[in-house]
Image: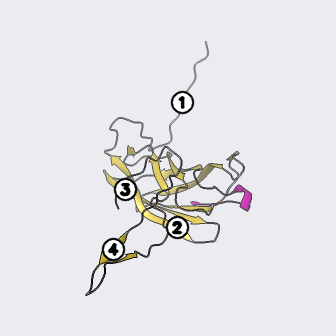
Amino acid sequence: MTGTVDTTLPKPAITASASVSYNVGGPAQTTPAASHAEDVDDFIVSVSPTSTNAASVNAELTFHVKNRGCGNNVAQVTITAPAGWTASSDVYSIVTDTLGNSLENNWTVSGTTFSAPTPAAQMPTDKTGDFSVVFSATPSSAGSSVFTVSVTDGTNTANHNGPETTVTVNAFGSGTLNQTQPSIWREIFQ
């Protein structure tokens, strides 16, 4: 079975069954196929903005994670940046916890690994979290950068580890602000 699931709706319950009929020198026999319950969709991860400029400083990226992968709560999210990106210590999170509360900066952070401080603060199925990192440097040339986002559940099982979050790095000075040097700004009072 293949298909896509609308990521804006609650996680659907999808079931399938199969059987086979055969006749080997006697009456027709029907045997149900053995199957196991499986999650058909995973954790949904996206990033915004999806582009920035080369050689930029203070480029903030927010990684949106929706728990659609399993019945276990999300306990940890790790963002691994590709070469050329330098993460600063300016990081924050907003996570919907098991009680439906929106927790701002409640998760602890080590580098770019965000962890729920308690089981109650973990992110349950069909809830979301935003994990923001300010990068003090972006790559020096244009191209695509693929970030790896790892999601770990409350049983310490890494359930999702995939490079599906791509950020386009545009040429220096191609539309958005680039700041490469400290500047002096003056105010004139009259």
Query: Can residue 110 be seen by looking at this rendering?
Result: no
Residue stretch in magenta: 112-123
Read off the residue under disc 1. Answer: 185
Q: Position of residue 96 (x, y in %)?
A: 65, 48
Report the Cα–Cα distance between label 4 and label 3: 47 Å
N-terminal-most mark, 1 or 2: 2
Question: Eyeballing the image, is 52 above or below 116?
Answer: above
Label 3 crowd bin: few (<14), some (14–19), many (20+), radius 10 Å = many
SS of the residue under disc 3: strand
Q: Viewer-nearest of labels 1 and 2?
A: 2
| Residue furthest to the left | 25
Residue 87, horizontal then vertical, whole percent: 52, 56
Q: Is residue 119 magenta?
A: yes
Q: Quadrant of residue 31?
A: bottom left
- Viewer-side residue, 112 vs 83: 112
Q: Which residue is mark 2?
A: 159
The amino acid marked with disc number 4 is Val
Q: Are marks 1 and 2 in contact (CB under 8 Å)?
A: no
CB under 8 Å between discs 1 and 3: no
Tell me the SS state at disc 4: strand
Residue at 58%, 23% (x, y): give it. 187
Secondary structure at badge 2 equals strand
Q: Residue at x 50, y 44 (%)?
A: 9
Residue at image mark 4: 20
Q: CA distance from mark 1 to mark 2?
A: 48 Å
| Residue linked to disc 3 | 145
Single out the mark in the foreground, 4 or 2.
4
Mark 1 surroundings within 10 Å by alpha-carbon count, few (fewer than 14), some (14 through 19), many (20 or more): few
User: Which mark lies nearer to you, 2 or 3?
Assistant: 2
Residue 124 x %, y %: 63, 56
Categorize mark 2 by other alpha carbons within 10 Å: few (<14), some (14-19), many (20+). Answer: some
